[in-house]
Amino acid sequence: MPLHPPITLSKPLRILNKGLGAVLLCVVTSAAWAQPAPVPPASSVCEPGEDWPRTLECLREKTGFIDIALQDSLRQLHEKLPTELRESLQTQQDDWEQRRDTDCTPTDRPASDSNALAYAMLCRSKMALQRTKLLQSLLEASELPPAPTDMNCPKEQAMSPQCLQKRQAVIENGMNGIYRSLLLRLPELQAQKLYAEQSSWEEDREAACQRIAGAHEPADQAVCHFVMAMERVKVFREVWNPLAKQNQTKNQTKNQSKREP
C-alpha cells in the first residue's frame, strides 16, 4: 500500500527522534558484535522532509541497528549468568517484548499511516535503548574485579582512612550484588524503574557526600558512602525484595505449568 507523506512529524515525534539520535552511536558502539554490524544510518537523526519514504527507511535502519545492539547485550549477559538467573532473564525479556509491542502500536491510526509507522519505530528504538542500557549495566558489573568481603581491621586501625575505605568497599560490593539480583528477578517494568531509581540515587549520593563538612577527606567520603549504602540496602530489602520474591514465585508457577503435560 503506498504511503501518503505528511508535511512534517508531530512535535512529540520530533523530540523523541532527536533524543534518540543523541545517544544512538554511544550505545551501539559499546556493544561487542558477534557478527559484522550493519552500517548505521548516515545521520544519527532522521529529519522529516520531502523525501518521506527515505525518512521512513532511515528510521527503519536505525531501529534495526538498535535492536542488534540489544540482542548482543542480551546474548553476552545470558552467557555470564548461572542457569537459574538465565531463566529469569529470558522471562523478563519476553515480558519486555510484549510490552514494547503493545506500547508502540498506535491504536488511533491505521497501520499504513506514515506518522503511525514513524511513531512505532521511534517508540521501539527508545524502549530498546532503555533496555540495552540496563543490560549493559549488568554486564559491566559482572566484569568488575572482586571486592574485599571482610570488613574487619586491627583495633588500632579501626578509624584509619584505609580501614574506612575497606569497609565502604565491602558494603558497596554487597549493595551492588543485591541490586543486580533484584534487576534480574523483578518484573521487567519494575526492573526498569529500579534501574532509573538507582541511577538517580547514585547521583544524589555523590552530591550529598560532596556537601558534608570535610568531604574533601578520603575518610569522610568513605563514611558518607558507607552510611548511604547501608540505607540503600535497607530500601532494597524492605521495598524491592518482596516484589522480586512475589514475581519469582509467579514465574516458577508459570514455568512449572508449561512443563506439565
Image (tube, helix red, strand yellow):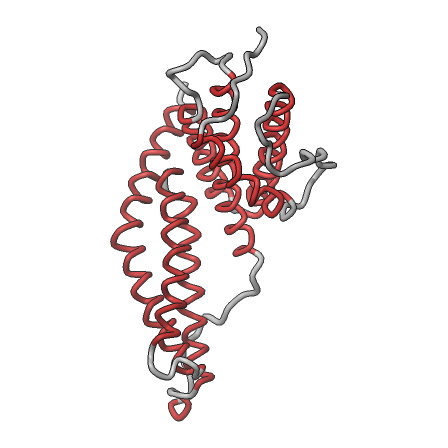
Residue farthest along the right direction in this orientation: 36
Q: Considering only vertical position in the picture, is 6 above or below 209?
A: above
Q: Position of residue 27 (x, y in %)?
A: 59, 45
Q: Position of residue 246 (x, y in %)?
A: 29, 40
Residue farthest along the bottom direction in this orientation: 156
**Quadrant location of residue 1?**
top right
Please state which of residues 229 and 85 is positioned toward the viewer in this rendering.
229
Please state which of residues 39 and 45 is positioned toward the viewer in this rendering.
45
How many numbered tags mark residues here?
Answer: 0
Q: Considering only vertical position in the picture, is 95 above or below 150?
A: above
**Quadrant location of residue 149?**
bottom left
For the point 43% across and 58% down, the residue is 177
Please state which of residues 10 and 150 is positioned toward the viewer in this rendering.
10
For the point 52% across and 56% down, the residue is 141
For the point 43% across and 59% down, the residue is 176
Question: Quick one: quadrant of the C terminus?
Answer: top left
Q: Considering only vertical position in the picture, is 38 above or below 210?
A: above
For the point 59% across and 44% down, the residue is 79
Residue farthest along the left direction in this orientation: 238
**Quadrant location of residue 46?**
top right
Q: Position of residue 38 (x, y in %)?
A: 71, 33
Please state which of residues 3 and 190 is positioned toward the viewer in this rendering.
3
